[in-house]
Structure formats: structure tokens, C-alpha cells
Image (cartoon, grey):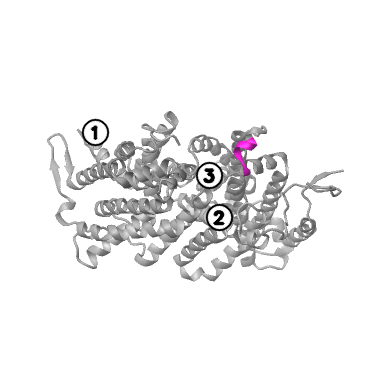
Amino acid sequence: MYRLTTRTRAGTVTAIIVPIFIVAALALPIVASRGVIQDLFFILTMLTLAQIWNLLAGYGGLVSVGQQAFVGIGAYAMFAGVILLGWNPVLAIPLGGLAALVLAVPTAFFAFRLQGAYFAIGTWVIAEVTRLLVAQWKALGGGTGTSLPREATSSILGTDAIRALFGVREAAARDVMAYWLALALVVVVTGGIYWLLRSRLGLALAAVRDNVDAAQSVGVDTGRLRWAVFLIAAAATGLTGALIFLQTARISPSAAFAVTDWTANVIFIVVIGGIGTIEGPILGVLVFFALRSALADYGSWYLMTLGLIAVVVMLFAPKGLWGLIASRNGPHLFPVRRRLTGPKIEGGI
Amino acid sequence: MIWLDTLVQGILLGGLYALFAAGLSLVFGIMRLVNLAHGDLIVLAAYLVLMGVTLLGLSPWIATLVAMPMMFALGWLLQAAVLNRVLGKDILPPLLVTFGLSVALQNGLLEAFSADSRRIPVGALEGASLDLGLVTVGIMPLMTFASAIVMIIALNGLFYHTALGRAFRATSDDAVTAGLMGIEPKQIFAIATGIAMVVVTLAALYLGMRANFDPSIGPARLIYAFEAVIIGGLGSLWGTLAGGIIIGVAQTFGAALNPEWQILAGHIAFLAVMLLKSRGLFPRAVD
């Protein structure tokens, strides 16, 4: 008679609208200019990174300031696959995810030894070490970096078909391919996190977030849970890093391991949008992009503003913009909360 | 002899890192707050001292004495107006707020002072050295190290021999019970952050006199400071000095082997200590 459900009316609407959105986004390159496609690529990859960081910090309680380690190592692994092994760049992207997963094991081993807040700086140290080590990798350009060779970028899987389909130049076709991959990645990552949060693992995560002791007392293995979340997040971040640098086709340690680009911006997106929700990063990335476009000409004022906005949001609206919209009975577009439904109990509980 | 020289340089460099770390350690010890903007606050203080020297024509020492109360006020205000609001059981809000501050501060400094690297002019002292027979040491590194020791003695004195220190320790142990005894924890936190900023100003003076600095170098100082604190073990200032020395020695030896390895060697030493003793070398605090 009684059922546990996460279904809400807004959730049903989402389930109908999202596929329509995805189809429209897939077809967009037919009409959109190259600049729009590049902007959307940026938005989609930042959204992917934001969803992953949100899973780590918002749900897993793991405040990592070292995600640039996984972006960087993922990108470098993809470059290594192309330059050293001669793989097609698109096929080398999974190498990025794999490399990030491998790096995540020692990272977690060290960082999990650090209690609470020190975990954050611990991940930052690992990212610095990785950057300095990669800068010694002379085959990939050492400290100055390198570019994808011309043969590799001109033969990226699928670009010939796109050129024939849309009648565009090779570079534009490459952007379309990267855009589609970014779209696929953001759908898989967001969908995957949504699925994860509704699974047993997600229930365990929510339990740990609400009360660690209570969660442990009902048999949640918090140690294993932290490892699982950290490794999943690292692998997904590595894939995203590989894709980002497939599009730029040029890499250097300072760009691939940039704490501002791959961690600070991502954190601001999540905090401004609303930490601990799937809707938050989506809203956050739109605000971020709007601010970025509006303040593009003001150099460092832009990052300063972004940092201060994040501080103000954290002080006065810790649940972010989405928290303001959805406070109490607002819409839950991606419902993950389990509710008991069934006939009304007489007398009430 | 070159190795002995490298060792001595490394030990003296450790004094600078201990200065960076003491403020961080103080704040963490009292309120369990990790201030991710610590490095950028050091850089801010360095610019304050530099302005005192270049605009007002003060000597670096006087400029530091002038900057210290200003930094104390800034720290007090930062804690009272911002950080006290986010302190709590959840570690996420204070981390994110200080991270936001770090980025804002870095870019604010960039806008105010440009990306040019600057240095606090000290005149003849800069190149002066002392011949100790076996090794020759610079006066400046020697003064840094001596300052670190004096600062640690002063902080320990404050901690263990004054009423304020007793309030610090009581609040650190149990803020609620301290509150019952008539201590206002938030007031204590604000004073502690203010004192940490005074230490930061001293660190900034040596940072600025010994090497070039620019607005972007804050995060790296935060990381060195953090490594020194963790190696030393939480809660012990002498441990923090030992941690700073280990990082310093690792860096100078790394640099002696290959200049590109200097920073890396420091980090590797940190990771090695973490691997062997995850609570640091001289842990005092239980958390």
C-alpha cells in the first residue's frame, strides 16, 4: 500500500522536457554559428566539471581544491595517446579518464589521511606535485607545453562526415565534434549523478551527509563510500579535461593544471547556483557565463567580482540561487528526496 | 662544504616558512578554521609594507610596525564580520568563503599593483653576509630565522602565561564551556585572527625583503605554510618550525641537484612525512 517514491510533478515535467532539449541541442550546429558552438562547448564542459565537484563536495562532503590535477592529467594522457601512441584524438579521450582514475588512488590515499578542512589543501598539494612532475615530461613539451600535430587534428574521428553534412571548414567541423562530445558527456555525467543519488549509494551518501554516526550505525561503510565518490569524480574529471584540451589542441602545464580555471571557477559556479542540488550547477553556469561575458573587458575585476559574489552568497544564501527559488515548496526538477506515499493514515503520525 | 652550506641555507629558509605557518597554525588551533586566503593575506601585508617604504619613505622596519596594527584591525574585522558567521560544525562554508576571498584578494591586488614583481628595498643589508668559518650565511636569512624563534617564544608566552592565552586555550578546548566561564568565543576568535595577521605582517616583511613578489604568489605560500604545520603536527609551534626546516632543507637540496626540482623536492618531503607519520612529527592536539 505504501510506496517509497522520489517522483514529483516538476520531475515528470523535467523527464519530458530534457529529451526535447537534448535533441534540439544535437541539431543546433545546423543553424548556430561557430562562435555560439564554441561558447556552448565552454558552458557544457564547465557544467560537467561543476556537477562532478558538486557530487564531491555537496553530496560527498569532500571539499577538493585539487580537481585541476585530474583535468590536467586527463588532458596530458590524451595528448600522450595521440603524440606518443599515434591514436586518434577522440579515441584517446578515455585514456584521460583512465589516467585520472589511476592518479586518484594515491591522491585519495594521501588526502584521506588529512582531517576535515586540511583535506582541501592536501588535494591542492597533490595537484601541484602532478603539475611539477608533468612539466618534467620532455616528450610532451616539458614546461612550455605542446600542440596536437596537424595530422592528428585533421583526422579527428567524425569530422569528415560533419564537413560533408554541414559543408563547413575543417576547424569548424572539429568544434562541432567537440561540442557533441561535450553534450554527450554532460548528459552522461548529470544523468549518472542523478541515477547515483537515487541508488543505494545515493541513499548512503545522503545518510552520511545528514549524520555520520547514525549512518555508520545502520551499516554504511563511510570509508568505502568516500573512496567510491572520489574515484568516480576523478575519472569523470579526467574525461572532461581530455575533451577540453582536444578542442583547444594546445596544452601546457600552467593551462592544464590551472587552479583558477578548473577549480575556482567551478566552485563559484556551484556555490552561486546552489550546492547540493543538481539544478544548482545548471543555474550557476548560466550566471557564470553571463558575468563572464559582461565583465570580459575588465580583466581581473571579473574574477574579483566572482570571488566576492561567492562569499556573499555563502554568507547570506548558503543554498545558492536555486536554494532561494526552491526553498520549501518550490519545484524539484531533479527530485532525489525519498518520500512515503499511500493512503492517509488516520489520526496522523 | 657545498652540502653543509646547502643544509644551513635550508635550515634558515625554514625560518621563513615557520613565519608563514605560525598564523595559519594559530587560527586553526583556536577555531579549527583553515584560512585558504592566508597566503594572499601575506602578499597583501607585503604590499602594505612596500607602500610604507616607497610612498612614506619609512624604513622597512618602521613600515612593518605601522602595518601591524592595520593588519590586526583587518584580521579582527574579517573574523568579526565574515568568518564568525560561517564557523560551525560544517567545514564547507568557511572553506568556500576563504577560497572566494583568496581569489578576490589576488585579483584585487593585481588590479591595484599590476603583475610586476616588486621587492622591499633594504639597502646594504641585502647582500651582507657573515663568515662563520665553515660556512658563510647571509645576514637576511639569519635575521629571518632569529625572528621566527623570537616570534615562537613570544606566541608561546602569550599562550601559556597570560589571561588572554588562557582564554585562547579554553576556547580551543571547548568553546561552549569557555562561554559559561564568561569568555565570549567570537570575541576571542576575532582577537586571534588579528594576532595571526600581526604574525603575517612580520612574515610579509621577510618575504618582501628576501625575494621578489607579485600578486600571484599567495597560494604557493599557503601551501608551504600548510606543509610546515602538518609536518610539525597540529598544535605545536616548535613542531611547525621543524616542519618549516624540513621543507626548507628539502628545497635547497632539490635546487642544488637541479633548479627545476626545488619546489617539487619540498612537496615530496611533505608527502614522505605524511606516509610515515600521518599525524606529523610532534603532534600535540588530538584532532
Image x and y of residue A6, in percent: 77, 49
Give me the disc on residue A266.
Answer: 2
In which quadrant is the N terminus of chain A drawn?
top right
**Quick one: B64 or A77, which is closer to the camera?**
B64
Nearest to viewer (mark 2 / mark 3): 2
Specify whether disc 3 shares its chain with disc 1. Answer: no
Circle 1 Cα neighbour tier, 10 Å, few/some/many (<14 / 14–19 / ≥20): few
Q: Is residue A15 left or right of residue A299?
A: right
Task: Give the alpha-carbon distance from disc 2 to disc 3, as whole Å.
Answer: 17 Å
**Circle 2 sits in a helix, a strand or a loop, which is it?**
helix
Q: Is residue A95 left or right of residue B222?
A: right
Give me the disc on residue A73.
Answer: 3
Task: Give the alpha-carbon distance from disc 3 to disc 1, as whole Å.
Answer: 35 Å
Image x and y of residue B185, in percent: 42, 50
Image x and y of residue A234, in percent: 58, 43
Nearest to viewer (mark 2 / mark 1): 2
- Say which amino acid is labelled 2: Val
Q: Which residues are magenta?
A: A210-215
Q: Is residue A277 left or right of residue B8?
A: right
- Say which amino acid is labelled 3: Ile
Q: Earlier in the sequence, mark 2 or mark 3?
A: 3
Give me the disc on residue B3.
Answer: 1
**Circle 1 sits in a helix, a strand or a loop, which is it?**
helix
Q: Is residue A304 left or right of residue A57?
A: left
Query: Predominant secondary structure in magenta?
Result: helix
Q: Label 1: chain?
A: B
The quadrant holding residue B30 is: top left
